[in-house]
Amino acid sequence: MAGSARRPLMAGNWKMNLNHFEANLLVQKLAASLNEKQLTDVEVVVLPPFTDLRTVQTAVEGDKLMIGYGAQDLSPHDSGAYTGDISGSMLAKLGCTYVVVGHSERRAYHHESDALCNAKVKAALTHGLTPILCVGEGLDVREQGGHVAHCSDQLEAALIGISAEQATKVVVAYEPVWAIGTGKTAMPEDVQEVCSSVRERLAVIYDQETAEQVRILYGGSVKASNVATTMAQPDVDGGLVGGASLDAEEFANICRFPEHIAR
Ligand SMILES: O=C[C@H](O)COP(=O)(O)O
């Protein structure tokens, strides 16, 4: 993010944690831990389970908290006989502004394909939601040196049929699978390598101006103790934080990262 015009984004992916009582407590604590300047410098977003969204909406709107929120997944369909699905329009009605698409846990445990991710990106954009499109390689791919091509290919496949104007509204999250929930953070230079290659691929698919507008996040064992060096990389515009976002004080410290980047 060094010198970039892109506003940093720190998104807390709660995954399948916290009931709606706990969700209310966490969002209130988080908001109380950050001041107006910090919440202006960095866009802070939480991504609770579906069952917590109404509670988070009530807290955010009722107390005018400067915190955004969104969902962890959405249906590629708009409505109808899709048992268990939640549509983009339902999320938009709940005040969501973001939705995660293609998280590696969904790709692995629910066999989500690039084609399905592409349909979900389109569904999100149709309903005015910002997709946080996840890409990332497994350890085997990294060890064979295929990580850059793997992530670029996932990106390109998920953006088929998306215009340049729409692409500027997409957030990309680079999450190496081997760094998720393992405590093994990728080295800042490794993160930069993939994030810059993602931006280069966006410039090839669209143009340089479009590529410069897209925010690219890093996710994988982000903590307050390691966030600053990663965020100091020029093509990293924020983070997608899992486990550490469940602790209000730790996540607030992560969101304060600009104060720890040497200028
Ligand atoms: O969406 C978040 C990522 O999967 C990272 O999770 P983690 O911070 O627990 O490693």
Image (cartoon, helix red, strand yellow):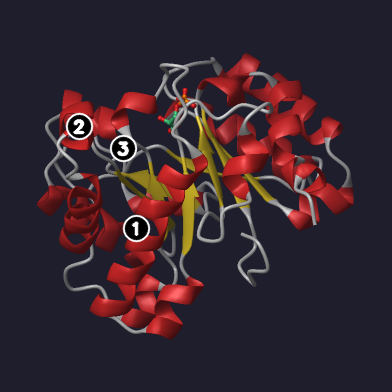
Q: Residue 143 carries which label?
A: 2
Q: Residue 151 carries which label?
A: none
> On the rendered structure, is 74 left or right of 213?
left
Which type of secondary structure does the marked residue at label 2 adopt?
Answer: helix
Amino acid type at image mark 3 = His
Q: Locate residue 34: give its quadrant.
A: top right
Residue 172 visible within the image? no
Residue 259 visible within the image? yes
Q: Mark 1 points at which residue?
A: 124
Image-quarter location of ligand 1: top left
Count of numbered circles on the image: 3
Q: Which of marks 2 and 1 is nearer the N terminus?
A: 1
* Image position of 252 with respect to 259: above or below: above
Circles 2, 3 touching at the beta carbon (< 8 Å): no
Q: Which of marks 1 and 3 is nearer the N terminus?
A: 3
Residue 204: x percent and y percent? Answer: 26, 78
Residue 162: x percent and y percent? Answer: 25, 73
Q: Mark 3 points at which residue?
A: 103
Amino acid type at image mark 2 = Glu
Residue 40: x percent and y percent? Answer: 79, 56
Amino acid type at image mark 1 = Ala
> Residue drawn 54% across and 15% down?
18
Question: Where's the N terminus, which quadrant?
Answer: bottom right
Residue 256: x percent and y percent? Answer: 77, 40
* Image position of 262 with respect to 86: above or below: below
Local crowd size for mark 1, using a 10 Å CA cut-off: few (<14), some (14–19), many (≥20): many
